[in-house]
Image (cartoon, helix red, strand yellow):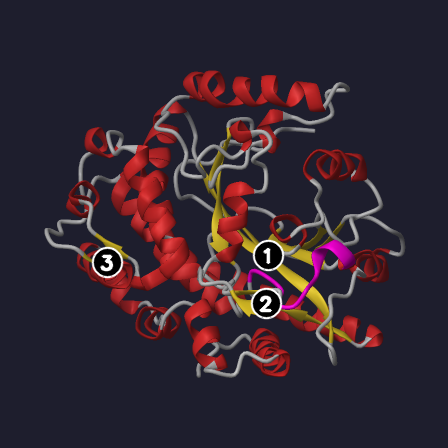
Amino acid sequence: MNQPSRLHLFQAFGIELEYMLVDKDTLAVKPITDELLKHELGEYASDFENGIVTWSNELVLHVIELKSTKPELNFNALEHAFADNIKKINAILSKWNAMLMPSAAHPLMDPIIETKLWPHESNEVYEIYDRIFNSKGHGWSNLQSTHLNLPFYDDEEFAKLHAAVRILLPVLPALCASSPILDGRLTGKLDTRLEFYKTNQAKIPSITGRVIPEAVFSKRNYINTVYDKIQADIKPFDPNNILNPIWVNSRGAIPRFDRGSIEIRVMDIQECPAADMAIITLVIELLKALVNEKFIPIEEQVKIKTDVLVSIFDDCIVSGPQAVITNDEFLKIFGIRTPLSAAELWKSILQRLITLTPSLEKWEKPELDIILTEGTLANRITNALGKDHSVENIKSVYRKLSGCLAQNKMFII
């Protein structure tokens, strides 16, 4: 088979959206992803290609991933294809009285009791993870995210993109947080998924690092700094060498030098594809501006300290758009001199991007307006609950979220 030619920066993008399968009445997780795929494929298998969108299995049987079959540039077509596939899946799931539910964590699931791992092909990898880390926990079996794959062609493009991505990651939870509830209770953190993401592989710390990637800007240095360390650290747990350090790496952005891409993994899934695609569009435009040195030169971007980025990231995990950013070094990137909230920073970035790229004024992104004025999905879920945190009220809110997903509409209180 011929290898596909590598893409250059921003030529096309791979996008992955994860959703949970739940009972329509009780909202309990429905571990039937294998049956859903078998319905289309005629056998138990892990991928069903349906035009520009492919359905795939995940670690657990109650999650389905919808991803662009190949890198795409036409986001309008891709958003509509995601929405159409969601409708198709919901129609099939109705035979089991099930439906898709969005958000980055099930608010009521008990993963210790309810987790069922994927039992079919490639399950030996899942079994090793389960043996090492115990996959029956919130950070493993109760999380749904959006992944964005960004291409790079060579070391020079990797350095520019990795530098820009490191700056972006800390403030992403202020746009994307959608996991404020676990075990039927508000956790006090808007992005609880990422709190678990930081710690669920603590037994082997080199796998996740500090989530914000190290300041490494070449393939050789990345292999020496990250992959060789992971390889050595997983060896005692994996004597048969089944785990590959390249895909064991769980930082918030992961370079794949074999295929020439960086995958961003810190975005919580939203209530509908329209919301995800609006956020992704803003993210890409910010990365373009950083790579093209519209804010500060690359030489200054690579000097930003990981400690600074991690501190902002941790604050945004807890408080999302209300997190106050005070670090002068970070604010200076965006030409800001006084502390401000993450929400105000994003509003400033959006206005700056529109100034830099006048065609962006043609964006019709009411989704971004909602997120930047009414808060992340986590904020809106919390506000919708009000003072009634009962199981029934939680179910009522998440039924509405499921309706938003089915109709590709924003969740507005």
Mark pair 2, 1: CA separation: 8 Å
Question: Residue, x 65% and y 26% (percent of image)?
Answer: 244
Q: Is residue 331 left or right of residue 257?
A: left
Give the camera-side residue of 248 and 69.
Answer: 248
Q: Report the amino acid beneath label 1.
A: Gln
- If you read the primary sequence from the N terminus, does the residue marked by circle 1 or circle 3 appear first? 1
- If you read the primary sequence from the N terminus, does the residue marked by circle 2 or circle 1 appear first? 2
Q: Is residue 22 left or right of residue 376?
A: right
Q: Is residue 109 magenta?
A: yes
- Res 61 label: none
Question: What x and y, as percent, mark residue 317?
Answer: 41, 54
Question: What x and y, as percent, mark residue 218?
Answer: 39, 21
Please state, as top left, top right, bottom left or bottom right, where the N terminus lies in the image: top right
Write down the residue under mark 2.
102
- If you read the primary sequence from the N terminus, does the residue marked by circle 3 or circle 2 appear first? 2
Write down the residue under mark 1.
144
The span picked out in magenta is 104-113
Mark pair 3, 2: CA separation: 27 Å
Magenta span: predominant SS is: loop
Question: Residue, x 53% and y 54% (percent of image)?
Answer: 193
Q: Is residue 134 magenta?
A: no
Mark pair 1, 3: CA separation: 26 Å
Write down the residue under mark 3.
345
Give the camera-side residue of 3 and 19.
Answer: 19
Give the SS element for disc 3: helix
Please tell me in which quadrant of the rendered image residue 114 appears: bottom right
Give the SS element for disc 1: loop
